[in-house]
Structures are given as structure tokens and as C-alpha cells.
Amino acid sequence: MAGAAGRMGQAVVAAVEGAEDLELTGRADPALGTALAGVLDDADVVVDFTRPETALDNALRCVAAGVHVVIGTTGFDVEPLREAAAPAGHRRANVFVAPNFAISAVLMMRFAAEASRHMARAEIVELHHDGKLDAPSGTAARTAQLMQGEVPIHSVRLPGLVAHQEVILGDVGQSLTIRQDSYARESFMPGVLLAIRRVPDLAESPLVGLERLLF
Ligand SMILES: NC(=O)c1ccc[n+]([C@@H]2O[C@H](COP(=O)([O-])OP(=O)(O)OC[C@H]3O[C@@H](n4cnc5c(N)ncnc54)[C@H](O)[C@@H]3O)[C@@H](O)[C@H]2O)c1
């Protein structure tokens, strides 16, 4: 687990320890005094919930070591991962990236994409806890990417929030609001565990979006 001491990292550690078919082999986090390099040898899969400026470098190190990686960190460019290939002599390592591991968020993105084909305009309001480093959120950016037309994004950061988003679509005399709320980090865990189990067998890499594993 990369980012094992963080909010998401602690939740993933607990989820993996609670899963009978998975074994936690290491916790990497500067806050624990442990580096990723020190846990790579024992891992089949690394899960990364770190920071926007470290996730890409961590993923490249994993791929170079032949270790699959599941990335939940948001706010970084995934493009360089497309060029990253495992060096000769190493087994192929896959990369799976999801800006949001909650099933309700994946459904929200899907319904928003569908609705945007029928409504004149749309805007996104994303709301997160005030410890979140990136804005707009990875989920909002991904939602806008999946929708038709230009979709402005508004970011709210307040204590007490976890992860929430409203997609508001407007047309003559009518509007539609699609709202998704993650009230607790446990909402992301079924998606993270699914990705850990499936990442070794991906047909393409990097694969982006939990919907690619679900539908
Ligand atoms: N994909 C999703 O469903 C989802 C859900 C929630 C949060 N997130 C994203 O996950 C990331 C982490 O969020 P958080 O709230 O847990 O943050 P956090 O700040 O609580 O935790 C991040 C942890 O990473 C550690 N870290 C920093 N550099 C590291 C490195 N090089 N190697 C290993 N660990 C390192 C930090 O010490 C910290 O403990 C953010 O980018 C956030 O947007 C994604």
C-alpha cells in the first residue's frame, strides 16, 4: 500500500486485511518512514493513494519492477503511463487507474454522459473535504470528459465533506440534477478490491475508469 498512513490508505489497508483472498505485504509512506522501494519485492500489486506529484513516479517504479499497480490518486497526467513498458526480462505489469472507485459515482458519470446528449447545457459542482489537494476533482474532470459540449466545473472545499458531486443540466423551462455522495471512505473499497483482483489480467494497460471493469 503506497500512502498507507493517509485517509484512503488506512481504509484500503483495513479492507485488504479483511479480504480472505488478499494479503497485505507492505506499507509505504514517508509518514511511516517506509519507501516504496522497500515494499516492491514482496508485492504482486501496489495500490497508490498518495499525492498528485508522486503517483506517476510511483507507478513508473512499479511497472519497471514488474509489479501491477492500481492508482486512485487524482490530479496527475496519466499519459506518460501509456509509453511506460516493462523492461525486457521482466513480466508484464499492468496499470489500472480510477478517479473514483465508488459504484454510485460511476453510475453518476454514466447517467450524466447520457443526459448531456439530450440537454442544451450542463455545469458540474464538485464538493470535497478541505484536505483535498487537487481542484477540480479527478471525478469532475472525468465526468466532463465523458459529457458532450463544454462543461464548466465549480469546486467547493469545506470541512465535514467527504466527496460529493452535482451535475446540473439545463434546457428551456427545465433542469435535471444528478447528485452523488460518498459519506465515508468505505464507499470506495469494493471498487478498490475489485481492481486489485482484476489488474493482473487486464487486456489493455493503462486502463482508466472503474466502469471498464464493471460494464
Ligand atoms: N479514486 C478514488 O476513488 C479516490 C477517493 C478518495 C481520494 N482519492 C485520491 O487519493 C489521494 C489520496 O487521498 P487522501 O485523502 O488519502 O490523502 P492523504 O493526504 O490523507 O494521504 C496521502 C498519503 O500519501 C503519503 N505519501 C506522500 N508521498 C508518498 C510517496 N512517494 N510514497 C508513498 N506514500 C506517499 C502521505 O504521507 C500521506 O500519508 C488523493 O489524490 C485523492 O484525490 C481518490
Image: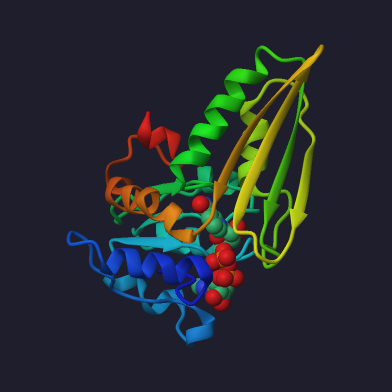
Q: Is residue 23 left or right of residue 181?
A: left
Q: At x 37% / y 63%, what residue is drawn?
A: 65
In the image, 85: left or right of 133?
Answer: left
As drawn, 78 above or below 58: above
Quadrant of the image occupied by residue 157 = bottom right
Residue 122 lies, with reference to residue 204, above or below; the image says above
Can residue 52 be seen at all in this image of the molecule?
yes
Position of the N terminus by quadrant: bottom left
Residue at 18 percent across and 59 percent down: it is 21
Please report the residue visible at 29 percent of the width from the left and 45 percent of the height from the top: 198
Q: Position of residue 203 (x, y in %)?
A: 33, 35
User: Left or right: where does residue 79 sit relative to residue 49?
Assistant: right
The quadrant in which the C terminus is found is top left
Pick whichever, 192 or 208, lies toward us. 192
**Picture coordinates of residue 195 (x, y %)?**
35, 48
Q: Is residue 86 above or below residue 9?
A: above
Q: Quadrant of residue 125?
A: top right
